[in-house]
């Protein structure tokens, strides 16, 4: 007769413990929402902002550029103003890498008469 190992209590599966050490990130955020009062406003904004942007863009029937600005530019400006020490290098990279790329794409579009 083979040794089948220790018997498990009813309802407990092999490989899982009753006190799970891995916490779901959403559950962890909700725990932080309840316990860390100083970041409550930011977490609520984080979870509700995409729904607000979706409703705003569909309510006013915004074009693509306006929707992109609402979805991406507003949060990035907020985070840039909130955490100023991370603003310098990414901004410099965006200007140095983005401007030449935009000039090249604009030139190609003008040559092909896309504009």
Image (spheres, rainbow, N blue to C red):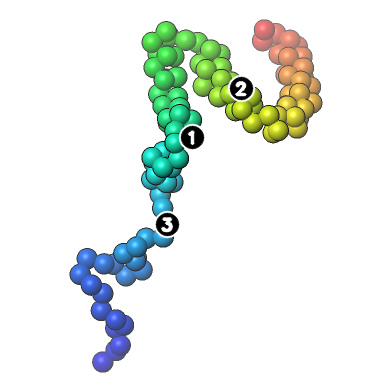
Q: Which of the 4 image quarters holds residue 48?
A: top left
10 Å crowding of disc 3: few (<14), some (14-19), many (20+): few
What residue sits 58% from the left and 20% below the top?
73
Image quarter of the N terminus: bottom left
What residue sits 37% from the left and 60% below the top?
20
Q: Position of residue 41 (x, y in %)?
A: 45, 29
Q: Identify the disc placed on residue 22.
A: 3
Whichever of labels 3 and 1 marks the residue nearer the N terminus, that label is: 3
Judging by the rendered image, the residue that carries numbered circle 1 is 38
Front-most of 40 and 70? Answer: 40
What residue sits 79% from the left and 22% below the top?
100
Judging by the rendered image, the residue that carries numbered circle 2 is 77
Front-most of 94 and 85? Answer: 85
Residue 87 appears in the picture as rendered: yes
Image quarter of the C terminus: top right
Looking at the image, the residue that sits furthest to the bottom is: 1
Cα separation, mark 1 vs mark 2, equals 21 Å
Front-most of 101 and 96? Answer: 96
Reply above or below: 95 against 56.
Answer: below
Whichever of labels 1 and 2 marks the residue nearer the N terminus, that label is: 1
Front-most of 101 and 60? Answer: 60
- Pair 1/2: label in front: 1
What residue sits 29% from the left and 89% below the top?
2
10 Å crowding of disc 2: few (<14), some (14-19), many (20+): few
């Amino acid at each position: 007769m083979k040794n089948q190992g220790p018997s498990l209590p009813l309802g407990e599966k092999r490989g899982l413990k009753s006190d799970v050490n891995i916490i779901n990130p959403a559950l962890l955020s909700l725990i932080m929402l309840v316990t860390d009062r100083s970041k409550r406003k930011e977490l609520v904004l984080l979870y509700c902002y995409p729904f607000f942007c979706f409703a705003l863009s569909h309510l006013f029937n915004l074009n693509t550029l306006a929707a992109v600005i609402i979805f991406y530019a507003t949060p990035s400006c907020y985070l840039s103003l909130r955490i100023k020490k991370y603003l310098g290098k990414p901004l410099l990279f965006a200007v140095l890498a983005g401007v030449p790329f935009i000039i090249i794409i604009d030139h190609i579009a003008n040559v092909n008469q896309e504009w």
